[in-house]
Amino acid sequence: MYSYPVVAGGASHLTIKNSSDAGNAIYYATADLFITKQKDTEPRCADRNNYYDINDPLVDFSRFLDGESLDQEDLVVWFNLGMHHVPNTIDLPNTLMTVAHSAVRIEPMNYLDGDASAATYQQVRVNSTTGEVERFEAQAANRSVDLSAL
């Protein structure tokens, strides 16, 4: 069975969660990730005019989450890509944004029919009962260094 875990990279937090100032205007920010059925009537999760009526916004993302089945449907992944920057002395006089980062990765899982790493010869099996180590042609590490050429 194939799957695609969505993995966040970097540090991000839901800082606006349960905000009374935001209401439903930014409902998409209440979780890191949402998956919904694709609908042409839902092209975006918010609108720039949502703040005019935060309790009944023009685009209310909470209505996208209607409990319908996602089996054999085209899906939309809505993820929050946030970033937090901890200020330090290199921020003076300006914040250096090249050191701040955020990322999201969609990684295939169970993509191959088998585990490709099982075919490698650099592996060992340790019997937890007896402590015996089976090496499968792997060579033990040689920690010696020939210093005669120096």
Image (cartoon, rainbow, N blue to C red):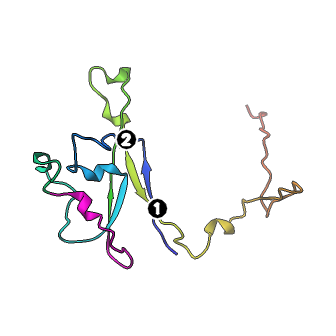
Q: Is residue 135 left or right of residue 83?
A: right
Q: Secondary structure at mark 1?
A: loop
Marks 1 and 2 sit apart, C-alpha to C-alpha, by: 20 Å
Q: Amino acid at mark 1?
A: Pro
Span shown in magenta: 59-75
Q: Residue at x 37, y 44 (%)?
A: 102
Q: Nearer the viewer, mark 1 or mark 2?
A: 1
- From the image, tell me which residue sits under label 1: 5
Q: Tell me the quarter of the picture where residue 14 sits.
A: top left
Say what amino acid the circle numbered 2 marks: His
Residue 10 on the magenta span? no
Q: Which residue is mark 2?
A: 101
Residue at position x 28%, y 53% in the image: 28
**Foreground residue, 14 or 121?**
14
The kind of secondary structure the magenta stretch mainly shows is: loop
Q: Is residue 122 above or below residue 101?
A: below
Which residue is drawn at the image coordinates 12% and 48% (left, top)? Answer: 53
